[in-house]
Amino acid sequence: MSDGLVRSVARTHGFEPLRVEGAVPDGLRGTLFRAGPGLMERFGRPLLHPFEADGAITGVRFADEVTGACRIVESPGYLAEEAAGKPLYGSATAWWRRIGNRFKAKGKATGNTSTLLWQDRLFALMEGNKPMELAPGDLSTLGKADLGVIPASFSAHPHRVPSRETTFNFGLRYDRDMHVDLFALPDRGEARKIGEFTAPWSGLLHDFVVTENHMVFVIGPAKMVLWKVLLGFPDFAEFFRWDPSAGTEVVVLPLDDLESPIRIPADPFWVWHFANGFELDGQIVLDCCRYPDLDSLIAIADEEADIAPSTLWRMTIDPTAKTVHSEERWAHVCEFPSVHPARVGTRHETVFAYAEDADQGFQVAAVVPDTGDAAIWAAPEGHLGSEPVFVPRSPEERDGWLLSLVLDPEPDRSYLAVLDAQRLADGPVCKAWFDHPIPRTFHGTFARTE
């Protein structure tokens, strides 16, 4: 099935029992929250890109029984459209309204990209607006949140550094330039804006890396086409052009001296997602899924598009010499990389990732970037998977479970696959089945309960 992403949620509901195939592992207790595009049309009018869709938040809870929920993020924009009985935002609405929304800086906080758990609060995130707060108990929408510090937007990729007991993130503001606001959300205490810097051009910035001592931004040459934005072009993918002549700029900011960014030129390439970063002998090492260009932005809306896929690369940055060295570490199609949460900001051995094989299709992989070795679970043919979320059982890197929400096209239903990360090739130890399909989700997080 090729419409695993560009389709709408079939049914919304609160937490209800799921059919479990296999045995839930002892010790797996908590809730997986996942975000993705939920409504690819509004009042019968199709949307052109999943990035503009109202978000759907899916939850799978492991307690005395396994239950699942799926709800639309009811943002102020969504509620206004429901009251009006017609689309008011995005490509489904009239040209004149799109222009008016641009000039009035009106947008919809769709919450369709990721989730954040902070101080027992749950947020649905998308990079173009502020977070939407949800009730963890039933996924109902509580309202838009600025945490007291967010002036414009809050990216969908916050990263918690255990050694600092703090989650870091950024947001973008556009005027004559693109300003990158920097935020710190401590485990205890209030959220803070800790700094900002100006990007080399106005464009697209999706993810970043934070180590124990640095924030690192890799700004590829995806430049905003301002006249298309101002004239209300309907397709989000047309808002940016790829300018390889500009190269890539790497911006390194010491966490204890954010007013002194180090800017380093590099060859042109694109990164949606980083696995992690760490410091080694005065250098900063980043693992990421790297593309040669921005064609993947089109492929998110058109899953049949023929593009150069991403593979796993390692970047080594020398802030003193201002050099960047990159090399491919796993020549296999992969995306949505992550590491054991206790390793964020420090040296890791294993990267967990969504992978694809031309013959076998969707896979879940555990890759050792130092050697290129990988353990793989290959899903049944035709199954459409999502980012694997690692849930640790202990501090050991592969001691835990990988959770991936999978769409089975034959019954057209989704299941959560639970895999033992130490024995991936054995396949799921259990599957928790929804009675309906869920469109492919982008990102998620796991909230553990004892």
Image: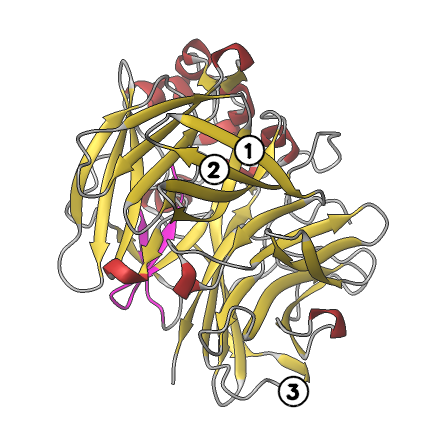
Report the residue at 67% width, 62% height from top.
406
Which percent across, then down, holds residue 148? 14, 47
Image-quadrant location for residue 376: bottom right
According to the image, label 2 marks what residue?
316
C-alpha distance separating marks 2 and 3: 42 Å
Q: Is residue 307 above or below residue 19?
A: above
According to the image, label 3 marks what residue?
23
Name the outermost residue toward the right.
Answer: 359
Is 133 left, or right, of 277 in this rendering? left
Report the residue at 61% width, 63% height from top.
404
Magenta span of residues: 117-136
Task: Give SS at disc 3.
Answer: loop
Image-quadrant location for residue 434: bottom right
Report the residue at 46% width, 47% height from top.
112
Which badge, 2 or 1, comes first in the chain's sequence?
2
Q: Which mark is residue 124?
A: none
Task: Give SS at disc 2.
Answer: strand
| Towards the viewer: 72 or 250 | 250
Amino acid bearing label 3: Ala
According to the image, label 1 marks what residue?
326
Q: Is residue 386 above or below residue 188?
A: above
C-alpha distance separating marks 2 and 1: 6 Å
The C terminus sits in image quarter: bottom left
Amino acid bearing label 1: Ser
Asked if the residue at tag 1 contacts the one at tag 2, i.e. Cβ–Cβ closer than 8 Å, the answer is: yes
| Towards the viewer: 422 or 191 | 422
Q: Residues within 10 Å of mark 1 (few under 14, many from 20)?
A: some
